[in-house]
C-alpha cells in the first residue's frame, strides 16, 4: 500500500479507530505543563498528551493484531533512549511546537516503524520518509483566536527541561472525526533492547 490520504473525515474502521499513531510519551511533569499551556490557549483540537510522534498516523490497516506485532517486535529490539529537546520553537498561525533533535536512536526507531508499516498501511498527514521526518512536540494546535497571541508568548518561556527518556512506544487510536474526536491508548510496548 504505502499510499497517502488526508485524515479529514476519516470514518472509524472495523476496530473502532479512524487513525493510528505511534508516540513516545513525555514524562508526567512535562505532560502536565503542556496540558496547562493548551488550557491557557483554549486549545480546540483533540490531542494526545505531551509526546513526540515516532511514526505519523496511518489508516486502512490490514489487521490490528498485525500492527501490534510489528510495534512489539521493534520495541523489543530498541533500548530506552534520550529524547532531546531543541530550544527552538516552531510558530505559525494556530500552532506551536518544540523541535526535537534527530538523534540516531530516535531516527532508528522511526525508520524501523516506517519501513515495516509502509507496505501495508495508508499514511495520513504529510510525508515522513527519510529527511521528511521532522520530530517535534506539539505544544498547542487550534487555540482560541482571542488567546493565541498570549499562548505563543507562554510557549516561548515554557521550560520543559532538556528532554525525557523514551521507555515505550504507545500505539494510539483516534476515535471519531479527526481533530474533534479523542485519542486513546490502544497498547503500550516497552522498549526492551
Image: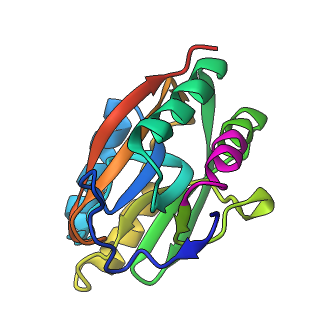
Residue 139 falls in image quadrant: bottom left
Q: Can residue 79 be seen in this view?
A: no
Say whether residue 43 is left or right of residue 58: left
Give the image location of residue 138, x and y in percent. 45, 59
Say whether residue 109 is left or right of residue 189: right
Question: Magenta residues, as a range?
Answer: 111-121
Residue found at x 40% / y 71%:
152
Q: Does the magenta stretch include residue 119?
A: yes
Q: Camera-side residue: 4 or 60?
A: 60
Q: Camera-side residue: 158 or 53?
A: 53
Say whether residue 87 is left or right of residue 50: right
Q: Camera-side residue: 162 or 82?
A: 82
Q: In which quarter of the image is the N terminus?
A: bottom right
Give the image location of residue 127, x and y in percent. 66, 69
Residue found at x 67% / y 62%:
128
Asked if residue 56 is positioned above or below residue 91 in the image, the reply reads above
Residue found at x 64% / y 14%:
193
Asked if residue 150 is positioned above or below residue 160 in the image, the reply reads below
Amino acid at each position: 500500500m504505502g499510499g497517502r490520504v488526508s485524515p479529514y473525515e476519516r470514518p472509524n474502521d472495523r476496530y473502532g479507530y479512524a487513525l493510528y499513531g505511534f508516540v513516545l510519551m513525555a514524562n508526567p511533569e512535562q505532560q502536565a505543563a503542556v496540558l496547562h499551556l493548551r488550557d491557557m490557549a483554549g486549545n480546540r483540537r483533540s490531542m494526545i498528551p505531551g509526546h513526540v510522534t515516532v511514526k505519523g498516523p496511518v489508516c486502512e490497516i490490514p489487521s490490528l493484531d498485525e500492527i501490534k506485532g510489528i510495534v512489539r517486535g521493534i520495541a523489543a529490539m530498541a533500548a530506552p533512549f534520550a529524547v532531546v529537546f531543541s530550544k527552538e520553537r516552531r510558530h505559525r498561525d494556530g500552532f506551536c511546537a518544540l523541535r526535537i533533535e534527530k538523534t540516531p536512536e530516535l531516527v532508528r526507531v522511526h525508520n524501523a516503524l516506517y519501513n515495516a508499516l509502509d507496505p501495508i498501511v495508508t499514511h495520513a498527514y504529510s510525508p515522513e520518509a527519510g529527511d521528511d521526518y521532522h520530530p517535534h512536540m506539539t505544544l498547542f494546535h487550534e487555540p482560541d483566536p482571542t488567546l493565541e497571541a498570549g499562548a505563543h508568548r507562554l510557549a516561548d518561556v515554557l521550560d520543559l527541561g532538556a528532554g525525557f527518556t523514551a521507555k515505550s512506544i504507545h500505539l494510539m487510536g483516534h476515535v471519531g472525526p479527526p481533530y474533534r474526536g479523542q485519542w486513546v491508548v490502544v497498547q503500550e510496548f516497552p522498549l526492551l533492547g
